[in-house]
Amino acid sequence: MMKSAAFAAALLLACTALSAADLAAFPDGKARDFPELKAPVRVVNFWGSYCKPCVKEMPEMSAWFKKQKKGSVDLVGIAVDRKENIAAFLQKTPVSYPVWLYTGSDSRSFMKAHGNTVGALPFTTVEAVKCGKREAILGGVDAKKLDEAVKKVSAACK
């Protein structure tokens, strides 16, 4: 049992270290990490400008985020793409939430560490930070899916 607990702790630490080292705010490049998101519910959307379902979901996701009560939900988009592609995309399609750039060398492993078992895009996680309940959504999301996931993870913490 102690070995399992030690392994789980080491794995969690490795995932945290991975995320801290491999994320930068766009466009300023300042290092970012998930713990700086302080709302009770954290929504993380992995996307790329080359991904048609990603491009389709972003305006609705942005509108959904604007309607959330301030401080109740954090949303961040993790771009798995090149800086110049992100800049061009966001000029055409601005979003109401922060975008961070994945800067590491193995995006598939990074996404797997966050629950994406196949490494495909788009991929969204909705997590109740207090209790760690996470809902992973592979494929496009809309306001209804986001509302349902937020409700589900929030209920798990009560």
Image (tube, grey):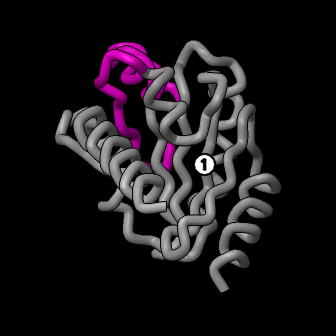
Segment colored magenta:
80-106
| Location of residue 122 with respect to 61 vertically, above or below | above
| Location of residue 51 with respect to 44 vertically, above or below | above
Taking the spot 68% from the left edge, 54% from the top edge, the residue there is: 135
Q: Position of residue 102 (x, y in %)?
A: 36, 28
Q: Is residue 62 visible?
A: yes
Q: Nearer the viewer, residue 63 or 5?
A: 5
Q: Which residue is mark 1?
A: 125
Q: Is residue 70 visible?
A: no
Q: Position of residue 109 (x, y in %)?
A: 46, 25
Q: How many marks?
A: 1
Horizontally, residue 81 falls left or right of residue 48, namely left
Taking the spot 48% from the left edge, 37% from the top edge, the residue there is: 113
Q: Is residue 88 magenta?
A: yes
Q: Nearer the viewer, residue 21 or 121?
A: 21
| Location of residue 37 with respect to 61 vertically, above or below | below
Q: Position of residue 59 (x, y in %)?
A: 64, 40
Taking the spot 20% from the left edge, 42% from the top edge, the residue there is: 31
Q: Count neighbours of disc 1 (C-alpha within 10 A) and say few if under 14, some if 14 to 19, many if 20 or more.
A: many
Taking the spot 40% from the left edge, 49% from the top edge, the residue there is: 7
Helix, strand, or loop for circle 1? Answer: strand
Q: Is residue 113 magenta?
A: no
Badge 1 amino acid: Thr
Which quadrant of the structure image shows residue 35?
bottom left
Residue closest to the far bottom: 158
Which quadrant of the structure image shows residue 124?
top right
Quadrant for the C terminus, please. Answer: bottom right
Horizontally, residue 93 falls left or right of residue 107, namely right
Q: Nearer the viewer, residue 139 or 54?
A: 139
Horizontally, residue 129 falls left or right of residue 68, namely left
